[in-house]
């Protein structure tokens, strides 16, 4: 129970990696506000008992972030941990990409993290302690040609993590990121696992020979949120089956 008496906000928590993070933080003793643009998170929160609440919000809109923070403080009285997990992608070739689609992905994947981090940090500063975890991606450094705004947003997440870390360290607030490889969620199934050929391509670049599970990312989030990571800030930890260590293909073990 490394997170006993801690309070966390997890965005994009109705499903996938965010839901797994919320479940793991509750297991570790935290009280968790699950936040998502989708209402399904309410059912997920209900399965987690009194330690969890749900708040529906579009975390790329400041007024809704402010309402999320107010709801968390009303429910739990404090904010110790923020996991900026909400994210989307949009597939389009560079020459066909529409401005609105570019803006939407950057707004949700990057600006939302700034808005939520600023709101949470203003509460954490009062207690001179806190932890922010941003969900980045291997695509902060590895690129996918038809996912221009996604890879750009994730590169920005790594820099946002560093600049937020050096800005808040004086207040005892740590800021790190996790860079997952391909994790078996709805986002990845739609974006890159939609055909046997696409799956083969991913696996040919993954030394461990498999996609990851949301729970494997949640375990890293629990570590970064705990005192076991007390001397870590400004870092991006890649959990990718070896993708970032690889510069050639591997035999696929189907
Ligand atoms: N799955 C993977 O392979 C990888 C994922 N990641 C990152 O992990 C994070 C979670 O991904 P994953 O679990 O796969 O995604 P999912 O799509 O499964 O879950 C993301 C959740 O966030 C919600 N959401 C979207 N926009 C907003 C918003 N503006 N405000 C609040 N909630 C919102 C989504 O709703 P809706 O469904 O309506 O969009 C969805 O419920 C993302 O940041 C993603 O980039 C990084 C590397 C690999
Ligand atoms: C949308 C992506 O393709 C998905 O999310 C990531 O960051 C991984 O690269 C997955 O493939």
Image (cartoon, helix red, strand yellow):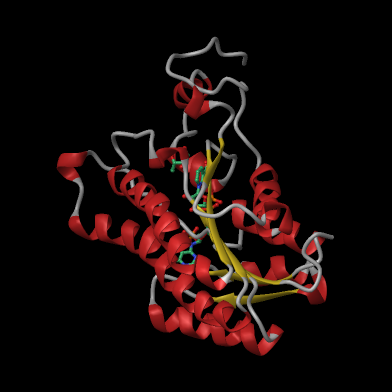
> Which residue extends farthest top?
251
Q: Quadrant of the N terminus?
A: bottom right
Q: Is residue 173 above or below residue 150?
A: below
Task: Indicate the position of residue 235 as horizontal and vertical percent values.
Answer: 51, 48
> Which residue extends farthest left?
95
Q: Nearer the viewer, residue 224 or 208?
A: 224
Q: Quadrant of the C terminus?
A: top right
**Drawn side of residue 6 relative to residue 40, left or right:** right
> Which residue is found at the position 31% from the left and 47% from the top?
152
Q: Looking at the image, can residue 82 be seen?
A: no
Q: Nearer the viewer, residue 95 or 244?
A: 244
Q: Is residue 144 above or below residue 26?
A: above
> Which residue extends farthest right?
1
Task: Indicate the position of residue 242 as horizontal and vertical percent values.
Answer: 56, 26
> Which residue is found at the position 46% from the left and 14% from the top?
249
Task: Indicate the position of residue 90 as horizontal and vertical percent values.
Answer: 34, 49
């Amino acid at each position: 129970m490394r997170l006993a008496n801690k309070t966390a906000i997890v965005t994009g928590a109705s499903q996938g990696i965010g839901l797994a993070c919320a479940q793991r933080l509750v297991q570790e003793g935290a009280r968790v506000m699950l936040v998502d643009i989708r209402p399904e998170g309410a059912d997920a929160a209900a399965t987690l008992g009194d330690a969890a609440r749900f708040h529906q919000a579009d975390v790329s809109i400041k007024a809704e972030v402010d309402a999320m923070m107010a709801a968390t403080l009303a429910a739990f009285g404090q904010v110790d941990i923020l996991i900026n997990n909400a994210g989307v992608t949009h597939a389009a070739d560079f020459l066909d990409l529409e401005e609105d689609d570019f803006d939407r992905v950057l707004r949700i994947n990057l600006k939302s993290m700034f808005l939520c981090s600023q709101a949470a940090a203003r509460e954490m500063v009062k207690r001179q302690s806190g932890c922010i975890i941003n969900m980045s991606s291997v695509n902060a450094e590895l690129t996918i040609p038809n996912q221009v705004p996604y890879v750009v947003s994730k590169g920005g997440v790594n820099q946002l993590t560093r600049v937020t870390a050096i800005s808040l360290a004086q207040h005892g607030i740590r800021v790190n990121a996790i860079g997952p490889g391909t994790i078996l969620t709805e986002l990845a199934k739609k974006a890159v696992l939609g055909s046997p050929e696409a799956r083969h391509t991913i696996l040919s670049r993954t030394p461990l020979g498999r996609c990851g599970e949301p729970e494997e990312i949640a375990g890293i989030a629990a570590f970064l949120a705990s005192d076991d990571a007390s001397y870590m800030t400004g870092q991006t930890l890649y959990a990718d089956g070896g993708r970032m260590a690889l510069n050639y293909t591997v035999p696929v073990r189907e």
